[in-house]
Image (tube, rainbow, N blue to C red):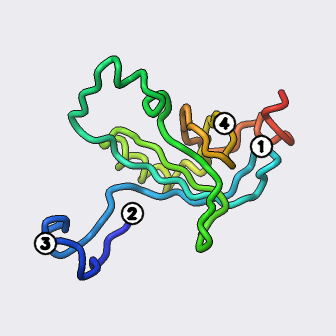
């Protein structure tokens, strides 16, 4: 999470209590275990709360952007902090539990990614676990 003093150009209406800037998202940083092509590359993954009271029509849900829970890709910025980055949404009420569990229990973030991360890929699902699943300990899970 981030809390800070805003730049002078930020409008007061966008500030928390009129003087702070913050994000209610959380960032998970780590290293990729599998597939082996990206083994030990660095990754930054943001989890943001789903907006409340979103009403989607059937036509909305059929759009490509609603066929995934997030995106994942190679970081191309020259001032990048990590090799890969991604983001996804989760129910707002799940974030406090997630933050607590990440600090004490969960250490592994699993992403199911469709597409080539070099071109931007879709995340179909994500989950957390206490240990690396046995199938990921092998050289490359995608070959099984």
Alpha-carbon span between mark 4 and mark 2: 29 Å
Alpha-carbon span between mark 4 and mark 1: 13 Å
Q: For the residues labelled 2 and 1, say whether their Cβ atoms are less than 8 Å apart.
A: no
- Does residue 93 appear in this view? no
How far from the left and from the top, in percent, is residue 74?
A: 65, 54
How far from the left and from the top, in percent, is residue 132?
A: 70, 43
Residue found 62% across the figure and 47% down from its top: 108
- Judge depth for marks 3 and 4 and give the one in front: 4
- SS type, badge 3: loop
Q: For the residues labelled 3 and 1, say whether their Cβ atoms are less than 8 Å apart.
A: no
How far from the left and from the top, in percent, is residue 6?
A: 27, 77
Which quadrant: the N terminus?
bottom left
Q: For the residues labelled 4 and 2, say whether their Cβ atoms are less than 8 Å apart.
A: no
Alpha-carbon span between mark 3 and mark 4: 42 Å
- Comes first in the chain, label 2 or label 3: 2
- Comes first in the chain, label 4 or label 1: 1
- SS type, badge 2: loop
In the rendered structure, find residue 18 and report the number of the disc placed on it: 3
Is residue 86 rendered to the left or right of residue 61? right
Name the residue carrying label 4.
115
Is residue 61 rendered to the left or right of residue 57? right
């Amino acid at each position: 999470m981030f809390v800070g003093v805003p730049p002078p150009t930020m409008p007061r209406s966008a500030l928390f209590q009129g003087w702070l800037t913050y994000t209610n998202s959380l960032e998970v940083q780590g290293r990729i275990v599998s597939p082996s092509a990206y083994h030990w590359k660095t990754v930054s993954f943001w989890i943001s709360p789903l907006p409340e009271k979103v009403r989607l029509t059937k036509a909305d849900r059929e759009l490509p952007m609603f066929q995934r829970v997030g995106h994942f890709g190679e970081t191309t910025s020259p001032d990048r902090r990590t090799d890969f980055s991604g983001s996804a949404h989760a129910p707002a009420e799940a974030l406090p539990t997630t933050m607590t569990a990440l600090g004490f229990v969960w250490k592994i973030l699993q992403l199911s990614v469709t597409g080539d991360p070099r071109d931007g890929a879709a995340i179909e699902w994500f989950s957390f676990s206490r240990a690396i699943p046995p199938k990921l300990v092998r050289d490359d899970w995608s070959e099984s």
